[in-house]
Amino acid sequence: MRLAEVSETFAVSPQIEPGDVPRLAEAGYRTVICNRPDGEEPGQPTVASVRTVAEASGIAFHHLPVSGGEFPAATIRSFAKIREEADGKVLAFCRTGTRSITLDALANIENMTADERIERARRAGYDLAGLREQLGQE
């Protein structure tokens, strides 16, 4: 499990395994958001398998799948609401973490400028410079 800390209360990561969840709970994560559809690639853990362990570990679990480079407005709003209402640290994951960091930048719950969000993503290891125009249209 490789977490990229975006802020004190938010991190993204590539696909997690059910066995990673207890360590997330120990590290203070209280919410997990899966941004990956089931069956995206062979051998991928099912959403249900991760959800079961998360809930047994006292972690709220949300499934907001995105694919094909599409980020529907309703999904962005749901992501923002989950982040705003989360009690404790939040981890969002997908195949590589890129969809999750993109959703965070689009949700912009901290009301940051496009440049600030791009820089924050860069520090976490993700390049969102190509989204500058889209991020500036709020």
Image: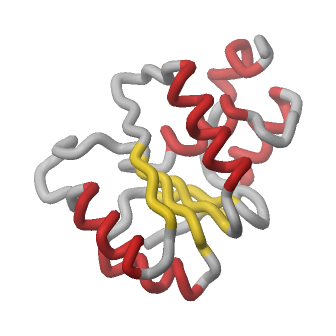
In terms of image quadrants, where is residue 40?
A: top left
Identify the residue shown where x is 69% and y is 35%: 105
Q: Is residue 110 left or right of residue 61?
A: right
Work out whether residue 2 or residue 11 is closer to the camera in this orientation and state it: 11
Work out whether residue 2 or residue 72 is closer to the camera in this orientation and state it: 72
Residue 109: give x, y in percent of width and height.
78, 39
Residue 31: give x, y in percent of width and height.
56, 63
Q: Is residue 99 left or right of residue 103?
A: left
Work out whether residue 81 or residue 44 is closer to the camera in this orientation and state it: 81
Work out whether residue 102 or residue 87 is closer to the camera in this orientation and state it: 87
In terms of image quadrants, where is residue 113?
A: top right
On-image quarter of the N terminus:
bottom left
Look at the picture and state if 38 lies above or below 132.
below
Identify the residue shown where x is 61% and y is 83%: 27
Look at the picture and state if 116 lies above or below 63.
above
On-image quarter of the C terminus:
top right
Farthest left residue?
Answer: 42
Residue 4: give x, y in percent of width and height.
61, 62
In terms of image quadrants, where is residue 16?
A: bottom left
Identify the residue shown where x is 69% and y is 65%: 87
Q: Is residue 53 left or right of residue 79?
A: left
Total count of labels: 0
Identify the residue shown where x is 43% and y is 84%: 22
Look at the picture and state if 14 lies above or below 77.
below
Q: How is the image coloured?
A: secondary structure
